[in-house]
Amino acid sequence: MSGEELVCVLDGATHGTADARASALRDWMTKIESVANSDKIRIRAEVTKQLQALGDVRLEKVEVRIEAGGKWALSLVSGEAEKDEQTVTPWDVEGGEDGINYAKLVDQFGSTAIDSDLLARFERLTGRKPHPWLRRGYFFSHRDFNLILDAYEQKKPFYLYTGRGPSSDSLHFGHTIPFLFTKWLQDVFDVPLVIQMTDDEKYLWKGMTIEQSQHYLRENAKDIIAIGFDVTKTFIFSNYAYMGHLYPTVLRIQKAVTGSQVKGIFGFVDSDNIGKFSFPAIQAAPSFPSAFPILFNGRTDMQCLIPCAIDQDPYFRMTRDVAPRLGQLKPALIHSKFFPALQGHKTKMSASVGTSAVFLTDTPKQIANKINRHAFSGGRETVEEHRRLGANVEVDVSFQYLTFFLDDDEKLEDIRQKYASGALLTGEVKKLLIAELTRRVEAHQQARSQVTDGVVDAFMAVRPLTF
């Protein structure tokens, strides 16, 4: 071809799916006369593979550039951050003025909203009322959860997978959400569970030393175990320690995913260390039973269900794309909303910002101080105005926390009505929350005191699980 650069621009509104992008690319390349047929065939195959790997993720624009010598480049532009004024990635969560728009995330990520029909089927098959977090919409989106229900109905084995990136001495309440929900799922379905501790991730992203990450791992494992998991059905593993078992599966995933795909999915740039480029395959690997030959007695026919916050979805979109090429079942996912920071619903609770979080090591005095001083209020500026107008319960952090931790639907609705009408004051709602959080923290601390290093070792031992 001559020295000019050829550019194909695919508008996201017109070409919103992988198939539509691939079709438009084919039509554009058919018309090109300045590129040798052999190069056109090769470039089209390579670019199409990249586009298919992206799936139907929403993009504002896709640019394909063909340069002299048969070189090509793929550029992806997402307009979501500008339009929504929200950022949701595995490393950064920030909402717009109205907080996180979860309906747009479902649309952007291409997942499926959990609806009443799915919950009715769950209750019919399991004989259990859906968890309050399902009923109240905090676990709001899924990928193939219906297939997990099929497996349960057909008595086919499956397993659960969740994880934690150890970055502090203690978990906070936001960290406990996926573990509490996973514990409930394990009890309902009576299935094995693997918990990945991504000690390597914190070294790559957070500048943490390997020694620090190992210390935090042990401390966080004690918090997780104290939630009440069954040691005969639960395996907690460090990526450092288990990598020898995990590596064959990691390697197959690494071979199936290109650097361009990883850049497109995760936004990595050339200046990022190569450990970041390889890490997605490590988080993906536990989605496949081949990663646990001893735990599952060599079985490779078990589907995986991953309860996680919606910001982790990019890892598993990639995983689901490569699964058929590796002869593996696609993992199913069930997504949660974020547990808001004390300062409000625009972002999530963070271990790195102490005043944004209530930790499981906090004393009753610390809990009361954090809620009274830092919990964003939806109440009015004066008592008179509050009695007249009532609180905005949608932005009030104390009420939102109660919706996570009060199991009694009728009691919660009574609080909501009274607070929204002005009958309850902000201080009274905060007092209710302080009592509930204090009760939960004290119960957790008592359970954690029984978790010895020997108990941690038992959960982390590589051995067959019961299922």
Image (cartoon, helix red, strand yellow):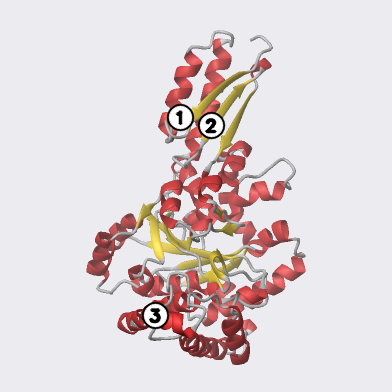
Q: Position of residue 338 (x, y in %)?
A: 50, 65
Q: Amino acid at mark 3?
A: Arg
Quadrant containing the N terminus in the rendered view? top right
Q: Mark 1 near mark 2, Cβ–Cβ under 8 Å? A: yes
Crowding near pointer 3: few (<14 within 10 Å), some, many (20+)? few
Q: Position of residue 441 (x, y in %)?
A: 54, 86
Callout in the foreground (1, 3):
3
Callout in the foreground (2, 3):
3
Label 1: which residue? 21
* Residue farthest to the left, as pictured: 124
Label 3: which residue? 388
Which residue lies at the image location 72% right of the left edge and 46% below the top edge? 272
- In 3D space, how far apart are the residues under numbered discs 1 and 2 (Cα atoms)? 8 Å
Crowding near pointer 2: few (<14 within 10 Å), some, many (20+)? some
Specify the quadrant of the image occupied by residue 264: top right
Label 2: which residue? 62
Q: Amino acid at mark 2?
A: Val
Q: Mark 1 near mark 3, Cβ–Cβ under 8 Å? A: no
- Disc 1 or 3, which lies upstream in sequence? 1
- Disc 2 or 3, which lies upstream in sequence? 2
Q: Amino acid at mark 1?
A: Arg
Instruction: Residue 451: tell me if it is visible.
Output: no
Quadrant containing the C terminus in the rendered view? bottom left
